[in-house]
Amino acid sequence: MSVAPFESVSVKIEEGIFWLTLNRPEARNALDAKMLAEIDAAFTEAETNDEVRVIVVQGAGGKSFAAGADIKQLNTRKPLEALIPGMQGLYNKIEDSTKVTIAAVNGYALGGGCELALACDIRIASNKAKLGLPELNLGIIPGAGGTQRLTRIIGKGRALDMILTGKIIDGEEAERIGLVTHFVTEDDLTRKIESIAGDILKKGPVAIQLAKFAVHKGYDIDEGTAMWIEKLSQAVAFGTEDKDEGTKAFIEKRKAQFKNR
């Protein structure tokens, strides 16, 4: 099934997966204002479509996932513009999506491109992947969540090392330090995405939303409060038809038919 056409990105829906492809290969999929607006619109479309369960973000051309922000546009930015939600606001929206988000990193994911991958739930890197936050070379800092998400994902010491040196690492190193979840060859990338998405599509949709909520909202607070978030999320799950169906299907040794309610 196809959805509304865009110019800087392309989108399609296949069997519950919303494929969002950054489509400026001639510019290494640099994230200019138009592309960011279209990513935002595409996520809104996916979020409101009950058919969609998983959103995959990937880059066209095979050379870049997203090479970062458009430097020509960045050069004209004024101080107070940094206070506008902008890219950081969009990436917060992606992190807060009720759908499961997967970043398929094949080629360069630098600066804002790396931060886009960090905002996704699951990151898969190919043997062609190159990831880094080189913003300090431009006299600025990672400003789309990079200083915070990278630290939480790989730890303060490793995050400072990557940010302060601006070094670019390959997919194998990214998996070793926990920056990406999976490392595969380029030929196996789509197969790995479909395998992971297939596992997710078998799960209860409401339970997925609640699990994401509990993990994200509980991560940065004290454990006791986080446990209450988990407990209250479980209470919501206990009241759903999906819980009744899932437990009944298990007892009856059959595949559950979840209805997202």
Image (tube, grey):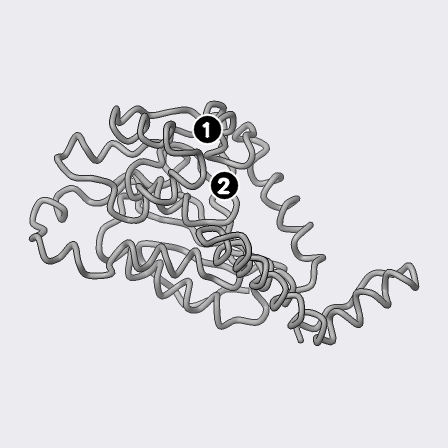
Which percent across, then down, holds residue 142? Answer: 25, 41
Instruction: Please say whether residue 197 is visible from this viewpoint.
Output: yes
Locate residue 189 relative to residue 39 in the image: left or right.
Answer: right
| Residue 9 image position (x, y, % from top left) | 36, 54
Question: For the residue labelled by badge 2, is the local secondary structure a helix, a strand or a loop?
Answer: strand
State whether residue 193 is above or below residue 168: below
Q: Which sits in the foreground, 189 or 131?
A: 131
| Lateral position of residue 185 relative to residue 170, left or right | right
Q: Which residue is mark 2?
A: 123
Note whether 252 is above or below 82 in the view shown: below
Quarter of the image where the N terminus is located: bottom right
- Res 130 quadrant in image: top left
Q: Is residue 148 above or below residue 255?
A: above
**Marks 1/2: CA distance?**
10 Å
Mark identifier at residue 186: none
Given contact means CB atoms under 8 Å apart, are the residues at marks 1 and 2 in contact?
yes
Amino acid type assigned to the residue bearing label 1 in the image: Ala
Question: Looking at numbered disc 2 in the image, what kind of residue is underneath it?
Answer: Arg
Please name the residue shown 42% across and 34% down the image.
155
Residue 16 visible, this angle: no
